[in-house]
Amino acid sequence: MDRQDIPLWPLPLAIALVFLLGTHAAWALSVHAGIVPGCVPYLEGCTSISRAAREGDGNHVFRLLMLPNALAIGLHWWLAARWLAGIGAGGRTVLGAGVVAAVALAVYVTFLGSDGEVYRFLRRYGVVVFFGASFLAQVAFLRACDGRLHATPRTRRALQGICALMLLLGVVHVIALAVVGGSAFQDRFENALEWWLGLGLVAWFLAHASLWRRVGYRLRAV
């Protein structure tokens, strides 16, 4: 490899770290300001990511970090589709779903904290579309690889395991709606679910960074 070639594994690594920093910094600032209660949101579900980042300094920090991260996510999935094309696999679904996820995140972050029915609609469905499109891009990526990751079996198993876990969380959510829908427990469960889904995305980008580092995916300097 030419020393001027740009390694691309730091991009998904940076996306994962910004996700962690943005969500937890917003939560910590909101707890400090008394906007949300102090608890362990992954276990107690006392607040959602959206609620923790909706007001005060937490909102400003969240927007400052997540809007560029939305752009980075779109770039990441474009590069993922480009990499798939380079190894002889199709990447159109990956690119399409990835772009939708990036746009949905940008819309969600832009209108987070805004008032009005339209803004609430954009916030609510922005985050739903973001998680859904991200999961679709992940599954499409694994299907497009279709056995081409034999050189990195540990990373392949990690990516598959993350997708399986996120699917399981979705199934459990559907069951919970049927059993305890409309209760206070449902609210807490959905709050905790949002945190766990966010953690699943972080894990995916970390594993993706490991994959690209192992295979040496680089952007050739012109």
Image (cartoon, grey):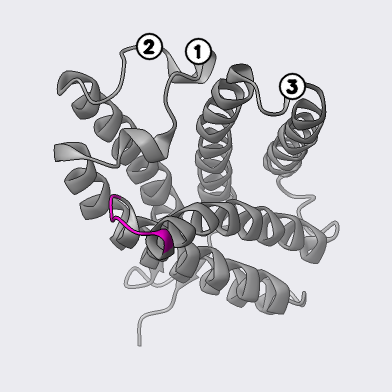
The quadrant holding residue 189 is top right
Range covered by the magenta-colored residues: 113-117
Q: Distance of mark 1 from mark 2, alpha carbons? A: 7 Å
| Mark 1 surroundings within 10 Å by alpha-carbon count, few (fewer than 14), some (14 through 19), many (20 or more) | few
Main SS, magenta residues: loop
> Where residue 39 sits in the image (x, y, percent)?
37, 11
Tell me: residue 197, above or below residue 7: above
**Which residue is depicted at the point 43% across and 44% down?**
16
> Where residue 178 sits in the image (x, y, percent)?
82, 30
Q: Earlier in the sequence, mark 1 or mark 2?
A: 2
Q: Secondary structure at mark 3?
A: helix
Residue at which label 3 appears: 180
Residue at which label 1 appears: 44
The quadrant holding residue 136 is bottom right
Q: Earlier in the sequence, mark 3 or mark 1?
A: 1
Q: Are marks 3 and 2 in contact (CB under 8 Å)?
A: no
Please name whichever residue, 76 or 200, is drawn nearer the observer in this view of the structure: 200
Q: Are marks 1 and 2 in contact (CB under 8 Å)?
A: yes
Give left or right: position of 136 versus 109: right
Q: Is 129 included in the stretch rendered in magenta? A: no
**Which residue is depicted at the point 44% across and 31% down?**
48
Residue type at mark 2: give it.
Cys
- State which mark lies toward you, 3 or 2: 3
Residue at which label 2 appears: 39
The quadrant holding residue 2 is bottom left
